[in-house]
Image (cartoon, rainbow, N blue to C red):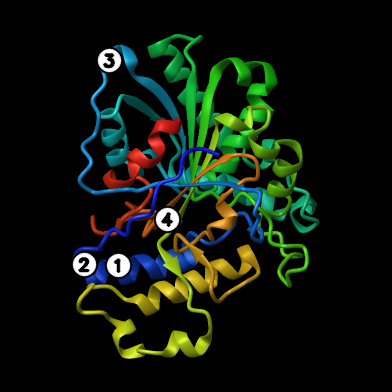
C-alpha cells in the first residue's frame, strides 16, 4: 500500500438552505438510477487515508510539465459541470479534457432499456454506451491535436464515469494502446462493485449487466497495471446504526442551525442510495450516494476522504443546480491534493 496519513474533518460553512434541500431531493431521484452496485468489506483492499486540508496552496507547474487528463463525467453530467475543477487542475499542471456530452446525449441510452438484453441483464457497454465512447473519442482527438498522438494521457472518472473509463480503455483502446498511452486511471466515487452475493438486493442489477461484464472482462482496471489505478471514496455521510438512533434528536436533524444543513435529509438520501448498492442501510459510510466499499477495487490503490460528498452539482434538464461552496466534494480545492498526485 501507499503511505497512510490521518483523516481530517473539514467543517462545513454556511449553505443556502433552499438550494441544498432542492439539490439533495433531486439527487435522490436523479443521480441514483442506472448506477453500479457495492461490495461488502474486504480486508485485502489497499486503502490510503490521506489528510485533506483547506489551506493547502496549489502547486504551479511549468507548461512543459502539464499532463492531459480525459474526464469521464458522472451520469447526466456535462463538460460545463466541471469548469471549476478544470481551473483548479490547470493550476496544478493538468489540462482537463471532459468528454463533450450534452444532456440530450444521455437520452441515447433509452433504446437499450427496450431490449431483451435489458430485461435479461445482459447489456454490453459498446452498444449501450456508444454515445459515451464517441465523446471520449472526441476528447482524445483534442489531446492528440494539442499534445500529439504519442503523449501519455491520464483518465479521470467521476461516479459511473469511472467504470465507463475502465470499459473504454479495455474495449476501445485495447491492451497494446492502453499500456503505451494511458499513464493512470483515477476514479472518484465510482460504484465499482456488486453487493454481497448473500444480500437480498444481489439479484437486482441496476446496470442490467453492464457492471458485471466490465468486472469480468476488465478487473482492477485491466488492461492497465493495477498499480496505476487509484479509487477515491468519500465519507460525507454515515447512516445511523438503527432507526431509533436516526430518530434521536429529530428536531435538530430537520434543520441544524449551527451547521445550516439538514442532517435528516442527507441521511434519508444516503439510506435510499446505499441500500441497493451495498445491501445494507444502517451503519454504512459513504459520500452520500456511494458507500465507501463500493468505490474501492481490490488490488488497486485507494484514497478515503473524510467529510467528502459525491458532487457539487445536481444535473437538471437545463443548467445543473450548483451546491454551496461549503458542500465539499472530490473536486473541492481542499481535497484535490489528496488524489491529484496519482493522475
Q: Do the residues bearing badges 4 and 2 touch, measured as CB atoms within 8 Å? A: no
Nearer the observer: mark 1 or 4; the answer is 4
Calculate the distance from the C-alpha at mark 1 to the C-alpha at mark 4: 13 Å
Calculate the distance from the C-alpha at mark 2 to the C-alpha at mark 1: 6 Å
Residue name at image x 58 percent, y 49 percent:
296
Q: Is residue 80 above or below residue 149?
A: below
Nearer the observer: mark 4 or 2; the answer is 4
The residue wearing badge 2 is 16
Callout 2: SS:
loop
Residue 227 quadrant: top right
Structural crowding at the residue carrying mark 1, measured as other residues with C-alpha within 10 Å and reported as few (<14), some (14–19) or many (≥20): many
Residue 278 image label: none
Q: Is residue 52 above or below residue 167?
A: below
Q: Looking at the picture, how far across and down is residue 228, in whole percent? A: 55, 29
Q: Do the residues bearing badges 2 and 3 touch, measured as CB atoms within 8 Å? A: no
Q: Do the residues bearing badges 2 and 1 touch, measured as CB atoms within 8 Å? A: yes
Structural crowding at the residue carrying mark 2, measured as other residues with C-alpha within 10 Å and reported as few (<14), some (14–19) or many (≥20): few
Query: Which corner quadrant holds the N terminus?
Result: top right
Q: Earlier in the sequence, mark 4 or mark 2?
A: 2
Q: Looking at the picture, how far across and down is residue 329, in whole percent? A: 35, 52
Nearer the observer: mark 1 or 3; the answer is 3
Answer yes or no: is residue 137 visible.
yes
Callout 1: SS:
helix
The residue wearing badge 3 is 63
Calculate the distance from the C-alpha at mark 4 to the C-alpha at mark 2: 18 Å
The residue wearing badge 1 is 20
The residue wearing badge 4 is 310
Answer yes or no: is residue 130 visible.
no
Calculate the distance from the C-alpha at mark 1 to the C-alpha at mark 3: 38 Å
Q: Earlier in the sequence, mark 2 or mark 3?
A: 2
Q: Looking at the picture, how far across and down is residue 196, in whole percent? A: 72, 62
Amino acid at each position: 500500500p501507499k503511505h497512510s496519513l490521518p483523516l481530517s474533518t473539514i467543517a462545513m460553512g454556511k449553505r443556502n438552505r433552499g438550494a441544498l434541500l432542492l439539490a439533495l431531493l433531486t439527487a435522490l431521484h436523479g443521480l441514483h438510477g442506472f448506477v453500479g452496485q457495492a461490495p461488502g468489506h474486504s480486508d485485502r483492499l489497499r486503502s490510503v487515508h490521506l489528510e485533506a486540508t483547506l489551506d493547502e496552496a496549489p502547486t504551479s507547474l511549468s507548461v512543459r510539465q502539464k499532463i492531459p487528463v480525459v474526464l469521464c463525467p458522472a451520469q447526466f453530467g456535462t463538460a460545463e459541470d466541471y469548469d471549476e475543477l478544470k481551473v483548479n487542475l490547470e493550476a496544478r499542471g493538468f489540462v482537463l479534457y471532459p468528454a463533450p456530452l450534452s444532456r440530450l446525449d444521455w437520452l441515447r441510452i433509452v433504446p437499450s432499456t427496450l431490449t431483451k438484453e435489458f430485461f435479461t441483464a445482459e447489456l454490453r457497454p459498446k452498444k449501450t454506451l456508444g454515445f459515451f465512447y464517441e465523446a471520449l473519442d472526441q476528447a482524445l482527438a483534442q489531446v492528440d491535436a494539442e499534445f500529439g498522438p504519442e503523449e501519455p494521457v491520464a483518465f479521470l472518472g467521476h461516479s459511473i464515469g469511472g467504470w465507463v473509463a475502465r470499459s473504454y480503455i479495455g474495449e476501445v483502446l485495447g491492451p497494446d494502446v492502453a499500456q503505451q498511452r494511458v499513464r493512470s486511471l483515477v476514479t472518484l466515487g465510482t460504484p465499482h462493485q456488486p453487493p454481497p452475493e448473500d444480500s437480498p438486493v444481489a439479484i437486482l442489477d441496476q446496470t442490467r449487466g453492464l457492471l458485471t461484464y466490465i468486472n469480468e472482462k476488465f478487473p482492477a482496471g485491466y488492461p492497465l497495471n493495477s498499480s496505476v489505478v487509484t479509487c477515491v471514496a468519500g465519507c460525507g455521510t454515515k447512516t445511523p446504526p438503527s432507526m431509533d438512533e436516526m430518530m434521536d434528536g429529530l428536531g435538530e436533524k430537520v434543520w441544524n442551525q449551527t451547521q445550516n444543513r439538514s442532517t435528516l435529509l442527507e441521511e434519508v438520501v444516503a439510506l435510499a442510495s446505499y441500500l441497493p448498492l451495498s445491501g445494507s442501510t444502517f451503519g454504512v459510510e459513504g459520500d452520500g450516494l456511494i458507500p465507501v466499499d463500493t468505490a474501492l477495487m481490490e488490488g488497486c490503490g485507494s484514497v478515503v476522504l473524510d467529510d467528502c460528498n459525491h458532487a457539487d452539482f445536481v444535473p437538471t434538464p437545463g443548467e445543473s443546480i450548483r451546491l454551496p461552496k461549503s458542500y465539499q466534494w472530490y473536486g473541492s480545492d481542499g481535497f484535490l491534493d489528496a488524489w491529484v498526485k496519482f493522475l
